[in-house]
Every structure is written in C-alpha cells, then in structure tokens.
Image: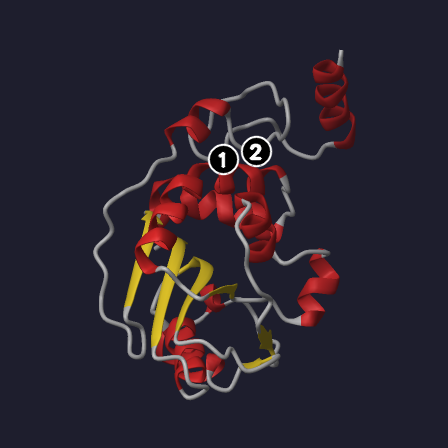
Amino acid sequence: MVKKAVEFLFDICFLSENLCSLCGKRFKPIIQGYVCDECIKNLRRSEVSVKPVKYVKHYRIYGRYREGWGEIIRLFKFKRVIPFADVIAKKIKYDFEEYVDFVKPEVITFVPVHLLRYWVRGMDHNEEILKRVGIKFEDLLVRVRWRKPLVFFDKEKRKEIVKNSFSLKKNPDCGRILVFDDVITTGATARTVSELLYYAGVKEIYWYFVAG
C-alpha cells in the first residue's frame, strides 16, 4: 500500500521521468525515480589512482566518478534527491570505517557548503552523508566565500577560487584529522583546507572522498 502511494506521488508530481539516468531504462520508482535499483546495486568500490596533494598525508577514494557515482552525487546535491544520501552512506560505510580504523584520527570533519547554498538546498550534503554513516564528527570548517560549483571551472581557475575560501570555527587542537568530501577532481579544495589545518597546528591530514 505504501509502495503504491509513493509511486503514485512520483507520477502526479512529475518528480522524475522514471527513466534511469545511468542505463536509460524505464522503471517503476519506489523511493526515487532517477536511478533504477539494478544500477544502484552495481555501484561499487573501484581502485582509483591518487596523486600527491600538498599538506595531505594520505587519502582514499571510494569509487570512480564516471562509473555512476558522479550522477548519484549530482542528483543528491543539485536536485535534492535525499534518498541518495542513504545510498551513498550504505555503500561507503564499511570502507569508511575501515579507513578511520587505519588513520585513527583524533577528529573527523567535513567540507561544508556556503551558508547561502545551505539556505537554498536546506542541507549540507557532506554532513547528511556522515550522519547516515553513523560516525562521530565535528562541524569544524566554514566556507567564507560563495562561488559557483567547481565543476564549471578549469584547474587553474579552481585554485584561484578556493584560495582563502575557508576558515575555522575553532582551533582543531589535534595532531591528526580526517576530512570527508564527496568528490576530488584537481585537489584544489583538499590542498586549501589542508593548508589551513596545517598552519592551525594539525600535522597529519587525511581525506576520504566518495568519488574521483
């Protein structure tokens, strides 16, 4: 009964076309009408090669952006398809906990959205994922400059944009920290945030990304 009611709600509200964004097939929505259950099932961890990022001791990427993860993250962030927060959290939970056990951070935090973007979206996507993973974290960083999403800019422009874009709510007062973010592309955000943390006294800075 509940399932049919949800399907009916999607249909009358035109919340989606019931066409999978990944495989293009039509499907009957249960929780959301953007990606079919089969494609969600096929989302998996991939070995992603990493390049050194200044001030970052080590980082891990869960999956490849082009293997479905990019679309899932895009729909969650920009179309507010909230069920994808649960999908992402469920997929990465074991791997993230394993990485936490490896790093043994004194503090776990995340890259925040700007306050204006928070008002527009009504959420911070990274914070929502961490809540669903169910691990203790701190809201430590502040994004002080608003700008368009970095996806719209090239590598050099991204470096310029993220410069001086963050500040700290308080001194982290720790020697080892783990920062969570959804996507790494050029590493500009990771470098900027890590530099800020390093000069605040954090000597070992680790990152975990959903996709790259």
Instruction: Work out whether 9 lies above or below 202.
Output: above
Kindly tell me whether residue 211 is visible in this rendering.
no
Q: Tags 2 and 1 in contact by the CB under 8 Å rule? A: yes
Identify the residue position indicated by label 1 in the image.
Answer: 21
Instruction: Work out whether 207 lies above or below 101.
Output: below
Q: Residue at x 40, y 48 (%)?
A: 96
Q: Residue at x 55, y 28 (%)?
A: 19
46 on left or right of 164: left
Distance between mark 2 and mark 1 Cα atoms: 6 Å
Point out residue 209 in the picture as x, y percentages from the top left corner.
39, 56
Q: Residue at x 47, y 68 (%)?
A: 150
Q: Which mark is residue 34?
A: 2
Kindly tell me whether residue 183 is visible in this rendering.
yes
Q: Secondary structure at mark 2?
A: loop
Q: Quadrant of the C terminus?
A: bottom left
Point out residue 198 in the picture as x, y percentages from the top left corner.
39, 83
- Say which label, 2 or 1, has the lower sequence index: 1
142 on left or right of 63: right
**Residue type pointed to by label 2:** Tyr
